[in-house]
Image (tube, rainbow, N blue to C red):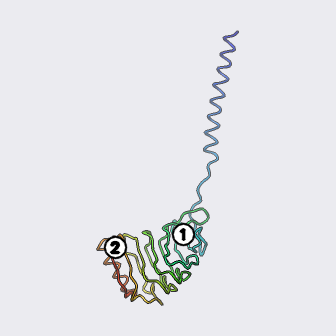
Amino acid sequence: MNKLVKKVLAGVIAGTMMLGSVCTAFAATGSATEAPAPEKHEAVKAENGSKVNTSASGKATVTSIKKTNKKEVSISSKVVVDGVKYTVTKIEAKTFANAPKATKVTLPSTITSLGAQAFTGAKSLKTIVIKSTKAVKVNKDAFKGVNTKKMTIKVTSMSKKELKAFKKQLKKAGFKGTVKLVK
């Protein structure tokens, strides 16, 4: 009888262990929450205080930055809206109007386009740092209302070919300042 009790107990323990592992596996897969998907939004506030337009493809356009009196302003390569990360690819009209004392603006490597009047309102702006490796598309009115004669654009990562294309875009946009390749 002692052997029979041992066999039954061993069977009960083995069954309990199997059932426990099945329940744990089910709980792990059944309760997992999915990450929110990117969505199209117009003029929404990102977690960093900027206003952005977002797309379902995960890209964001900065339309205005949070009001600041800082001398140096940087745009992040990512913004978060409703828990979803978006890649910043564009700067639009009057983005820097809330930074009238900014003398230096740094744009991330993810920037592909500067929209019309992107720098309008940035009255003190003297230096723009662009970290992109590709020539950034520049709207012909990107610098409208801004005196670019004493302005410098510092490019950190472009090849000479891309830099040449970028300078051509800037010239079409009426930029009259200096463009430098810096390392």
Residue ranking furthest to the left: 160
Q: Which of 119 and 56 is in front in this view?
A: 119
Q: Position of residue 56 (x, y in %)?
A: 54, 66
Side of 94 relative to 10 (left or right)? left
Amino acid type at image mark 2:
Val
Dot 1: within a 10 Å radius of its alpha carbon, few (fewer than 14), some, or many (20 or more) residues?
Answer: some
Q: Position of residue 37 (x, y in %)?
A: 57, 61
Q: Quadrant of the N terminus?
A: top right
What element does badge 1 sit on?
Answer: loop
Q: Position of residue 50 (x, y in %)?
A: 57, 73
Residue 49, compared with residue 122, is above or below; it is above
* Residue drawn where x is 50% and y is 84% of the image: 122
Residue 24, compared with residue 144, is above or below; it is above
Discs 2, 1 touching: Cβ within 8 Å: no
Give the label on residue 182, or none.
2
Residue ranking furthest to the top: 1
Q: Distance between the residues labelled 2 and 1?
A: 33 Å
What element does badge 2 sit on?
Answer: loop
Q: Name the residue under label 1.
A: 55
Specify the quadrant of the image occupied by residue 128: bottom left
